[in-house]
Image: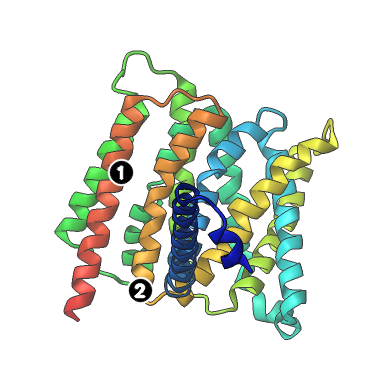
Amino acid sequence: MFTQGFCQFSPPLKICLSYIIKIFNFVNSLFENFLNFFIIFFMKKKSYILGIIVVILWSTAASAFKISLRYIDHIQLLFYSIVFSSIFFFSLILIRKNFGELKIKKNLNSIFLGFLNPFLYYLILFKSYSILKGQEALCLNYTWPIWIVIFSAIFMKNKIYLENIFAIFLSYTGVFIIFTNLKLRNFNINNYYGSFLALSSAIIWGIYWVLNVKDKREDNVKLFFNFLFSILYFFIFIFIKGFNLKLKSIFYLIGPLYVSLFEMGLTFVLWIKALRISENSTRIANLIFLSPFFSLFLLSIFANEKILITTIIGLFFIISGILINEFFLTKRKNRI
């Protein structure tokens, strides 16, 4: 029927329609091939895709901190973020029916781990973000991988080699560049205090990470109890200091809710998933080093920060030191 109708057209129109049909078939075939390729790629590379999604979400955290701190203080941001995260992890436990793990005796490690993170770590980190520019707090906090190397040597008896010392020196050259902006004369006390806090948060995270590796509990349960105990510490802190947790508007909860999901909660679950399903977890883990560069870009857009050239140079030194550590660590593992 279609062929008979097609034959009734004039020769130029026939040629034109035939080309249109050929183009349509080609585009359709191209789309099907692309769809098949994407499905195959996703099945094989879903750990990479998941890892990249998490890195992008984590990259928004610095902007979320700075924007939230325009409307609420660092104490309020911390409290409501912890509460929302606790609800999130408890919901995961209910969904996965890990009720047998909800015993205090099995989770006594969280008494100390919960004090380190999220309570102390984010208390100090959020305060540093309230003092410093987002780019400064971000980069100084990002020295935590260096402290993991140091505390692994202390707590896990790992050796520190000459290349580790060089890497630490290189990273802290970057810290010096960011810390001073290469302008030692025009430096104020807020920079000292804020920078000290940001660097301290990196040290705390390094301690927490090493101790957390030695803790073999199920991740969701462990994180839930960490957050639960941190709420208790927070109430003690509030009782002593007398901070006001009342918000001027319910809309100010949007910031803490975002931070709880995409900095503290959901992202950690997805990241652990990406590492577990990956054929090469080291490659997935290295994606995290893209995060600070994405974060700087997002800070310039959403937090309206002018990114300084000294920040970029300093971050380059910090990441270079971290990557040197990672390179030699991988090299030594391959020899074993």
Determine the residue positioned at 48% across, 63% down.
25
Residue 122 place in picture, x, y as percent: 59, 47
Q: Secondary structure at mark 2?
A: loop
Q: Residues within 10 Å of mark 1 (few under 14, many from 20)?
A: many
Name the mark on residue 318: 1
Determine the residue positioned at 49% across, 58% down.
21
Determine the residue positioned at 68% across, 61% down.
227
Does residue 131 lie above or below 162 as drawn?
above
Residue 268 place in picture, x, y as percent: 56, 62
Query: Which of the image's four quarters has the N terminus?
Result: bottom right
Name the mark on residue 280: 2
Colour approach in the figure: rainbow
Residue 172 place in picture, x, y as percent: 28, 41
Mark 1–mark 2 distance (CA, rounded to whole Å)? 24 Å
Q: Amino acid at mark 2?
A: Asn
**Residue that sits furthest to the top in the current view:** 186
